[in-house]
Amino acid sequence: MFWLSRYVERAENMARLVEVGYRIGLIPKEGGGPFEEWGSALASSATAQAYFAKYETLDAARVVDYLLFDPDNPSSVYACLATARQNGRAQRTALTQEMWESLNSTWLEYSTITRIGMTTTSLTELLVWIKQRSALFRGALLGTILRNDTYFFSQLGAFIERADNTARILDVKYHLLLPAHERVGGPLDYFQWAAILRSVSALTAYHWVYRENVKPWLVADLLMLKDEMPRSLASCYENLVQNLDRIAKTYGRQGPAQRQARAIRARLENSRIEEIFQTGLHEFIDAFIEDNNRLGSAIAQQYLL
């Protein structure tokens, strides 16, 4: 259940990364390579090395195919949905009927989609569909499953994966996308940050919270430190701490996973975005991604191996 939820969340996150590349690719700009936004999508999903081992050159259509359909890419939407369904079949009795039907029908429909001749319109519709199907599974899980260790581990998998994705999307924008000759806060910078907000369904939330034009430090503040934002790092770790504590109560003992989650949560609570930008946003995000990966390993070591 832990990995099933991770793979469903990863499929949605991969669709969001492709959407980032697509939206930023539409922005007129001078300088930089024509496919730099797709190179950044590969870098953020940690698939660049595997992609270039298979293809010699960066090509938009190949990148989209690799991230959405390639069965050899274990993080592609195709591979994630296939693995999630396999995990669901292995633990069929742990899933409610609604959870299984949403998972199984998603895989059956997606496996029939042809990648040949995909247009811009059909790509956009597909990305929306992937996000909707992930939301359907999440709704079935939240609405039908008992609040026991099965539910708690499902939540752990989803929020570990979501925190990783939010951090990677932020890092791609700040560290990789803005051309060297463009100033932070310039027109290109503004549209790129707005594209990032749209990709994580946070543009409306941004205006509700800040009631200002899009500013890089406020976008980072929203996606990193605001508990109210469901895809923020802070919100993910609030949920991770809660569910790890529930597991500890269920099993009657705590361990390294609980301590690590609380330490990361406390660091986020005590951080201020001004200080993060002064010391380096990229460095902060890099350290967070490493800590998040270590927490995933700690959960596996403590409970799953």
Image (cartoon, helix red, strand yellow):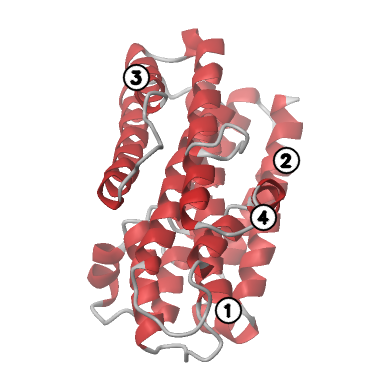
The residue that disc 2 covers is: 297
Mark 1 and mark 2 lie on one chain; the one further toward the N terminus is: 1
Can the viewer see residue 38 in this picture? yes
Mark 2 and mark 4 lie on one chain; the one further toward the N terminus is: 4
Q: Nearer the viewer, residue 182 or 173?
A: 182
Local secondary structure at mark 2:
helix
The residue that disc 3 covers is: 105
Label drawn at residue 194: none
Tag 3–tag 1 contact (CB < 8 Å): no
Mark 4 and mark 1 lie on one chain; the one further toward the N terminus is: 4
Q: Nearer the viewer, residue 35 or 241?
A: 35
Residue type highlighted by circle 3: Ser
Residue type highlighted by circle 2: Ser
In whole angstroms, how far apart are the C-alphas of marks 2 and 4?
Answer: 33 Å
Local secondary structure at mark 1:
helix
In the rendered image, residue 214, in percent from the top left (x then y), is placed at 32, 79
The residue that disc 4 covers is: 56
In the rendered image, residue 296, in percent from the top left (x then y), is placed at 67, 42
The residue that disc 1 covers is: 276
Q: Residues within 10 Å of mark 3 (few under 14, many from 20)?
A: few
Q: Nearer the viewer, residue 245 or 304?
A: 304
Residue 233 drawn above or below residue 212: above
Tag 3–tag 2 contact (CB < 8 Å): no
